Image (spheres, helix red, strand yellow):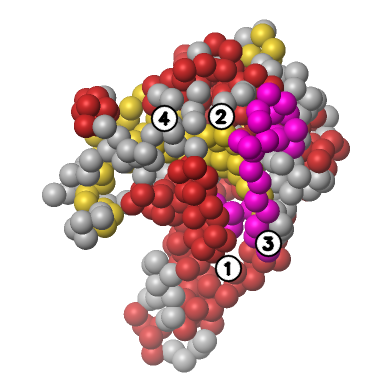
Amino acid sequence: MKYMATYDLMESIRNTNEWFGASAQAFASYPVFALSMNPFLPVMAAWGKVTERSFERMAAKPDWGIRSIVGPDGQDHLVDEKIVIRRPFGDLVQFFVRRREPMARRILLVAPMSGHYATLLRSTVQSLLPDADLWVTDWHNARDIPVSEGRFDIEDYTLYIADFLKELGPDTHVIAICQPVPLVLAATAWLAKQDPAAQPRSLTLMGGPVDPDAAATEVTDFGRRVSMGQLEQTMIQRVGFKYKGAGRQVYPGLLQLAGFISMNAERHARAFSDQIMREARGEASDHDGHNRFYDEYLAVMDMTAEFYLSTVERIFKNREIARNVFTLRGERVDIGAITSVAVKIVEGEKDDISAPGQCLAALDLLTGLPESKKARHLEPGAGHYGIFAGKSWRLNIRPLVLDFIDANAGAAEVSPEKARRIRAKTVTPIRLASA
């Protein structure tokens, strides 16, 4: 499987389906057919439109699209995206709110590198931005990274997180979602020994696989069934000539997407068939619920082969974090070294990706942390997506997380002198909202 031809074949299939969709829509929308009462033609045009949009989204990185927020003064404040740290495999991005003084809450939102872009957390960002200064990890698509930039595995990922925390300083509160949870825990433990002053004030760990064996899911079952050799031979491909990362070995986002969809194939099939019928009846729109969700869900990115394989081997198979034997650059990282960082665990009762118990295992590893600094929350009826972006997040989890942050903030407000220092560290925005 590790050939450019295989990667290019997948891209060709995607392109072909996009073309089929566009062709079907154009053909069925031909003006002369308006004289026909054949109900098949509107359905054909609707199928074409939905198909073209779906396959087109698989190759495009979504935009954050956060133009402004309403401030406490009741006025709209424009929002800029600023790169604070630029790295080959991922940037630290600040959502800078114009004409707003630095806020007491400083939050680093660690996005997962698991096949989707950081924009999957758009609604999470929008909900937190009015009440906090916010930074996000923006991971890059491996297909766009030249092979000259070298490797990137889970140890590199962990060091990226540690560097981001050093940059933001000790008044930062971290929210890690899904895949990065065990590595954020490791990065904090690493800082506890290497640079204690750079540790964040709190960690909110949401639905992550700290101990995959604590509760079985299809993801953990797959990890146990398949050997590392089988994974390398069947899942790893080389980026084709179309992209800057030509020749780089990756785990393609399209394969990851196929896995996601297969876990709930019936539900996705029903969602698309319903959308086709809505299009045929003229009831659909560009920004309806289906398109808002699937425009993001279908936008996938490649992971470096070494990151994917090391995640499966070290986090899922060997359970290095769960057994507290994770090593970073040859040195053991002791989770028990965390003694002052408050930690809150958030899980969803119906999470089928990281089942309840997998993330909660982190509290047992924090042997040096007082019980008063540990907290946990199991959200009834919530699935994996719901704990950070759905109804459960909006109505219940978000207020609980902000209360936890406030309870462990240390300082009640940002001093004028510190505010000036923070603003002095901002850099030229990469994208400005229009004035």
The circle on residue 341 is 2
Q: CA distance from mark 3 to mark 1?
A: 28 Å
| Amino acid type indicated by mark 4 | Asp
Q: For the view shown, which residue lies furthest in the left direction?
A: 435
**Relative side of 350 to 168, left or right:** right
Q: CA distance from mark 3 to mark 2?
A: 27 Å
Is 367 colored magenta in this rendering?
A: yes
Q: Residue at x 54, y 60 (%)?
A: 396
Dot 4: few (<14), some (14–19), or many (≥20) neighbours within 10 Å? many
Residue under label 1, please give it: 272
Q: Earlier in the sequence, mark 2 or mark 4?
A: 4
The circle on residue 171 is 4
Specify whether residue 428 is in view: no
Above or below 212: residue 389: below
Dot 2: few (<14), some (14–19), or many (≥20) neighbours within 10 Å? many
| Amino acid type indicated by mark 2 | Val
Q: Earlier in the sequence, mark 3 or mark 2?
A: 2
Chain part drawn in magenta: 361-390
Q: Residue at x 53, y 73 (%)?
A: 276
Q: CA distance from mark 2 to mark 4?
A: 11 Å
Q: Earlier in the sequence, mark 3 or mark 4?
A: 4
The answer to which of 86 and 256 lies nearer the viewer is 86
Q: Earlier in the sequence, mark 3 or mark 1?
A: 1
The reply to whether the C-beta atoms of the residues labelled 3 and 2 are less than 8 Å apart is: no
Disc 2 secondary structure class: loop
Q: Residue at x 65, y 28 (%)?
A: 369
Above or below 6: residue 399: below
Disc 3 secondary structure class: loop
